[in-house]
């Protein structure tokens, strides 16, 4: 709490404490020069930029804005456009210390005891869906099965790749059927293909983009099947090669690595050729298949099980 208070004072100095400093004028006489405190910015950092600092960043935002955790978290994600990753223990900790944060906040004016958390907060695993593009999020089945959380983030469409959602009948009836797309019979087994589904998936994403809303793309854990669709969309939308689109999506997934199955990866390499043909560009790969496979393996090596 002391850290939050210190950062807040640096950003919001008390300008009433206007002090003066004695200086000499041109004639050598002493004069008093006003020194009004200036607002300062504070850099919160850690090794990867989010793992160790997300908890402090969220706590400070709650303190500075006088917001409970269930309002602060979506606002940071939605309005400040800042992806956060937190652990389940972080959710529990922030919830437990929330009364003290709000009680000492210079902005909160309500009753700390009367703050009630919505149901979606208790169902969080700590992570939020990752914003890959303004209209496309990558997540897992838990995210898809938490529709209240999705609405908090402005996500109103769901693209399920091989994993059906499980909602109550009441929620299912309220969600427009045209905002749901289920790609059936696609397992992450190296046998099932995804190429034939690219066009309809990307069309579904484009519909959401034109409506000004966001779509969650998910499979079971958001690592292979749904990541493949997101990479294909980045290639289509931004004109990136497969290696560049892979890194683009991976960087925005924070500490959850993406690892499309080798079959999906090769399909994406062929999708790159399709994109080049569509744009009338020469069929020249930025990296060959063997190089791509080797580089991806090297990037994922630190996450492998240690023997």
Image: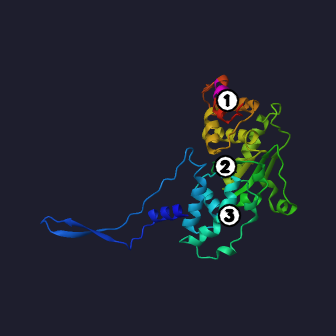
Q: List x then y, in percent, for residue 24.
A: 18, 65
The disc placed on residue 159 is: none
**N-term-proximal mark, 2 vs 3:** 3
* Distance in Å between CA atoms under marks 2 and 3: 22 Å
Residue at the image point whose x is 62% and y is 61% from the top: 75
Tell me the mark number nearer the camera, choosing from 1 and 3: 3
Counting other residues with Cα less than 10 Å from the Cα at mark 1, is it few (<14), some (14-19), or many (20 or more)? few
Say if mark 2 contacts mark 3, CB within 8 Å: no
Instruction: Please tell me in which quadrant of the rendered image residue 194 appears.
Output: top right
Q: Secondary structure at mark 2?
A: strand
Q: Secondary structure at mark 3?
A: helix
Kindly identify which residue carries mark 2: 130
Residue 282, above or below 248: above
Whether residue 270 appears in magenta in the rendering, the answer is no
Tell me the mark number nearer the camera, choosing from 2 and 3: 3
- In magenta, the rendered stretch is 291-296
Locate the C terminus and report the quarter of the image it occupies: top right
Q: Secondary structure at mark 1?
A: helix
Tell me the mark number nearer the camera, choosing from 1 and 2: 1
């Amino acid at each position: 709490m002391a850290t939050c208070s210190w950062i807040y004072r640096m950003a919001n100095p008390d300008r009433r404490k206007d002090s003066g400093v004695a200086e000499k004028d041109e004639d050598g006489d002493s004069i008093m020069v006003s020194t009004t405190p200036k607002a300062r910015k504070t850099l919160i950092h850690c090794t990867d930029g989010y793992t160790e600092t997300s908890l402090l960043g969220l706590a400070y935002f709650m303190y500075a804005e006088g917001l409970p955790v269930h309002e602060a978290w979506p606002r940071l994600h939605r309005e400040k456009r800042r992806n956060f990753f937190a652990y389940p223990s972080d959710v529990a900790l922030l919830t437990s210390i929330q009364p003290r944060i709000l009680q000492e906040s210079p902005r909160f004016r309500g009753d700390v005891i009367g703050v009630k958390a919505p149901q979606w907060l208790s169902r969080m695993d700590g992570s939020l869906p990752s914003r890959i593009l303004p209209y496309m999020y990558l997540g897992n089945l838990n995210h898809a099965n938490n529709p209240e959380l999705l609405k908090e983030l402005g996500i109103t469409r769901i693209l399920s790749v091989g994993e059906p959602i499980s909602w109550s009948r009441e929620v299912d009836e309220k969600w427009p059927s045209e905002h749901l797309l289920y790609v059936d019979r696609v397992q992450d087994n190296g046998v099932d293909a995804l190429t034939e589904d690219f066009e309809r998936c990307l069309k579904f994403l484009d519909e959401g983009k034109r409506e000004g809303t966001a779509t969650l793309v998910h499979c079971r854990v958001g690592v292979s099947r749904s990541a493949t669709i997101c990479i294909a969309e980045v290639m289509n939308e931004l004109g990136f090669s497969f290696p560049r689109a892979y890194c683009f999506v991976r960087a925005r997934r924070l500490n959850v690595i993406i690892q499309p199955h080798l079959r999906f990866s090769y399909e994406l390499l062929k999708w790159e050729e399709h994109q080049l043909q569509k744009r009338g560009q020469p069929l020249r790969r930025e990296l060959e298949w063997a190089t791509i496979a080797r580089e991806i393996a090297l990037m994922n090596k630190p996450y492998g099980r240690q023997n």
